[in-house]
Amino acid sequence: MSFVESISFTAAPAFLADRSLANATFEKIVALDGVLGLYQGFVEEDPNVFYIAIVWSTPNTKLSDYPDALSGLTSLTATHNQPTHYRTTLNGIIDVSVDAPATEVLSLRLKGGFEYPELDEIMKTMAKDINEGKVEGALVPCVWGPAENLSPSPEEPAGTPFLSFAGWTFSDLHRAFEKQMHGLAGSDPAYGALFMRFITIVEDIKMLHVNYKKFERSISRRAPIKMMAIIEA
């Protein structure tokens, strides 16, 4: 499994013009205890929107525990407000999904009164061909899990947020697959019933593609002892 904090915001004009403005903040984040990786990129469908996925070693750590790093991200937003934060425990390793040329990010909300295990079983069926390596362009595995909104608003509706990540060689191949699945929902009674149940128990469905890149620490920022180890080797 993976413990992931997903952050998104509309980028400030200065950040859009000079993406290196994020480097100092990213350096602080990847140096934090427990951070296994930071992936960042703009949304294909709206290049003004920026997404970050921080992979943590434990499920309870979050960026808001480190105000200095969080304030650095806030300075990159168009409104200078706190970005949208979700924390999730995924049912698999996220690395393949965010290392892919295109990452499908699906977010939705399980309606109040419904239980997560039912959604999990539906997702297993809907993603079966992907996770068995039978879909052109899809990278195994597709991972998902229930999420917690770390930046809730007073109007936050009832229900459980949910996030899913899937890697694709091209986003157009994912769109073609989605079109195929919608066609199947109309022609295959069993799949149609499953799809109808899915849209009955969820809401606020949002699907997009992010061009994630892993942020690597600059050599000059790494601990000298590590450099000495490289020299001695």
Image (cartoon, rainbow, N blue to C red):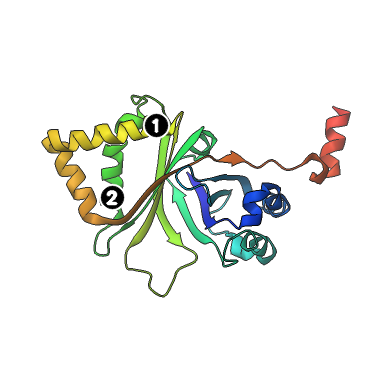
Which amino acid type is marked by label 2? Leu
Task: Please determine whether, in this image, residue 110 is positioned above or below residue 179.
Answer: below
Along the line of sight, the residue nearer the viewer: 226 or 67:
67
Query: What residue do we see at 26% from left, 38% from top?
Result: 125
Q: CA distance from mark 1 to mark 2?
A: 26 Å
Which of the 4 image quadrants contains residue 222? top right
Q: Position of residue 26 (x, y in %)?
A: 68, 51
Looking at the image, can residue 34 be seen?
no
Q: Which mark is residue 55?
A: none
Residue drawn at x 32%, y 68% is 158
Question: Which residue is the site of mark 1?
Answer: 172
Which badge, 1 or 2, comes first in the chain's sequence? 2
| Residue 25 locus on image (x, y percent) | 70, 55
Outermost left residue: 189
Mark seen at residue 119:
2
Residue at (26% x, 44% y) in the render = 122
Q: Mark 1 is on which residue type?
A: Asp
Q: Are marks 1 and 2 in contact (CB under 8 Å)?
A: no
SS class of the residue under badge 2?
Answer: helix
In this view, the mark in front (1 or 2): 1
Q: Is residue 22 above or below residue 131?
A: below
Side of 80 relative to 218 (left or right): left
